[in-house]
Amino acid sequence: MPRESEIDIRGCKLFLRRAGKGPSLLFLHGAQGLSGWLPAFEELAARFDVLVPDHPGFGRSDNPDWIDDVPDLAYFYLDVLAALDLGAVHLVGQSLGGWIALEMAVRSTQRIKSLTLADSAGIRVKGVPRADMFICGQEELAQLLFAGDGATAWLAEWSAPERAEVYDRNRFAAAKFTWQPRLFNPKLEKWLHRIDVPTHILWGDEDKVIPPPYAAVLQEKIAGARMTMLPRCGHLPHLERPDLFAREVARFIETVAQ
Amino acid sequence: MKVFVFHLMPYAYLDMGYREKYRAPWVVLPNSYFDPKKGHELYNRYLDELELAAESGFDGISVNEHHQNAYGLMPSPIVTAAALARRTKSCKIAILGSAFCLREHPLTLAEEHAMLDTITGGRLISGMVRGIGAEYYSMGVNPAFSLSRFQEAHDLVIQAWTRPSPFAFEGKHYHFEYVNVWPRPYQQPHPPIWCPSTGSTETIEWASHPSRRYVYVQNYSPIRSVVKYLNQYRQAAANIHGYAASSEQIGWAAPCYVADTDEQARNEARQHIEVLFNRLLRLPFDMMFPPGYLSAASLRNMRSHKASVTGQEHTVESLIEHGIILCGNPDTVRRRLVESHRLLGFQNFLALLQFGTLPHDLTEKNIRLFAKEVLPALQSLTDKEYAGMEAQAAE
């Protein structure tokens, strides 16, 4: 099990899970938040020093007024990296976490060794429809997030009464950061050429929330980016295909980015 | 008591087959369901109904704002209020309300309200609302900032109406170098502000603040919620803000239908009121309350409140039983209202006399009968007839 701690960054308490040995890997979660330490993290912890925070507003972290959009989160996490003083880390972001990672990387890659973007938000590909994760109830959302039967376990986990409060809290934070413009920053795409670290685009081939054409555009815009499509997988590969997800993340880092 | 007739202007020709394909008559229902020729007929009919109310002795008539749905055809209440401004002479015109915070540029609304107030010689009441949660989908506004945008848009508009101008407005959401609204409102310092709500603690505490003392109007609620929230307003004034709220600050809005007998009233209202509650107001919870629109505590409250209003299939009988609507012969409705006033002391009442698919002939009959048989008794009610919160608790 991971060590749990709170770190204070300019008055914002950030809840952090950490386990494993090896090069540091920072995982940035998506708009649904995290239910805890996951099997995919455990796999990665066999090879890496894995750090998994709850973003400000999510889970057990503070929700300060002064962090109110994704560029704020990007500067905040650059401050987190400076405070942790880990040297350069492997940054892995899923969905909203991928968007934060992109915003960090266009600002500075000084403390970023490689970038892995899993079903990442952040840009808008015109004409490619995305599912609306806010307008539906929990059951329908579960169907949108998964390609296969992972939906059942996800729903069982998040519909538990003791999770209701954190579910509402995560949805509130997700709306704050992603509602408008929905899941992207119109200013981001034109700066993607600034990303100068090895980049891996990892995507569920049945993602309905941010469909695969988004992966192709990111690959086109980020010089030298590799792409791996995960079969029979939806928007949450770290939950739906944890073994495959961890293996592909590790393989890219160890073969390309080390 | 001041008594208003309130209109939602629903799309009464909605093909109810929509339910097989679409989850709600809001946000996702295609506008191909709207027939402009029928819309033309409805707008003019509804305006006629409000004009009839103005001629029938009501203190005011009221319009409101809703976006992208079949529930209410007034995306701009300014248009309907302007149409009524020159066709009425002495009654108040209440916009309940304008969602200033749904706009990127609330100053345009501040200008339009000031125009209406000036054209009518000070007959405008300005309602300030946050909009229904569904409208944050339709208008692309972030619900997580709804409350802070609402409060800041309010500050901007009030300052635009009252501060020496031009001045710069420096907010979090709104930034203007030159705020200098022409015309100024006719009423000084500004038109009365009303806040209709279904019981948000944030709205109640904010509206009752001594620097505002805005009229709080509870709408679409079972009588036990009306009791709870109208008392909550008085308690917030007393316990948080340290003053006794005047009954002029309290209002209630409810659908009403009167006919010669209780049975006739129920039978005539039945299908039309059931369309309002079982169809037009039927939204999935996450569409009605997007994340961030309510605080965590209000969200939990609303889950139980909504279960009672929009979470179940209603009949005219269940709506009457819960006190969500008033329906019966004039004596029944009058007695119910007078008794509620004795317990709650609201000095403002808004009657929704057209609802759902209620056709013009029944709406007109309802307006005339209510005006003749119920209205005079209500208008004579003063604070003297209010028993006070202590008496209510004792009962």
Image: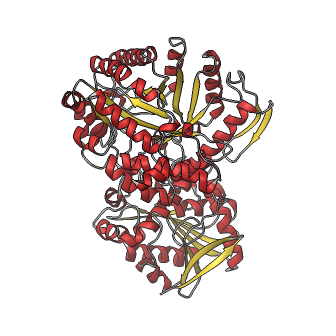
Q: Is residue A39 above or below residue B193?
A: below
In the foreground, B103 or A28: B103
In the foreground, A230 or B83: B83
Q: What x and y, as percent, mark residue B61?
A: 47, 23
Quadrant (top left/top right/bottom left/bottom right) for the C terminus of chain A: bottom right
Q: What x and y, as percent, mark residue A238?
A: 42, 71
Q: Is residue B339 above or below residue B376?
A: below
Looking at the picture, the colour scheme in use is: secondary structure
Q: What x and y, as percent, mark residue A149?
A: 27, 67
Q: Quadrant of residue B46?
A: top left
Confirm whether residue B251 shows in the render: yes
Confirm whether residue B356 shows in the render: no
- What residue do we see at 77% from left, 33% from top? B163
Q: What x and y, as percent, mark residue A20?
A: 53, 87
- What residue do we see at 54% from left, 47% from top? B142
Q: Quadrant of residue B373?
A: top left
Tell me if A54 is positioned left or right of B22 in this view.
Answer: right
- What residue do we see at 35% from left, 59% from top? A138
Tell me if B273 is positioned left or right of B252 in this view.
Answer: left
Tell me if B91 is positioned left or right of A132 in this view.
Answer: right
- For the image shown, how many numbered marks are present on the structure? 0
- What residue do we see at 57% from left, 67% from top? A55
Q: Is residue A2 above or below residue B29?
A: below
In the foreground, B253 or A57: B253
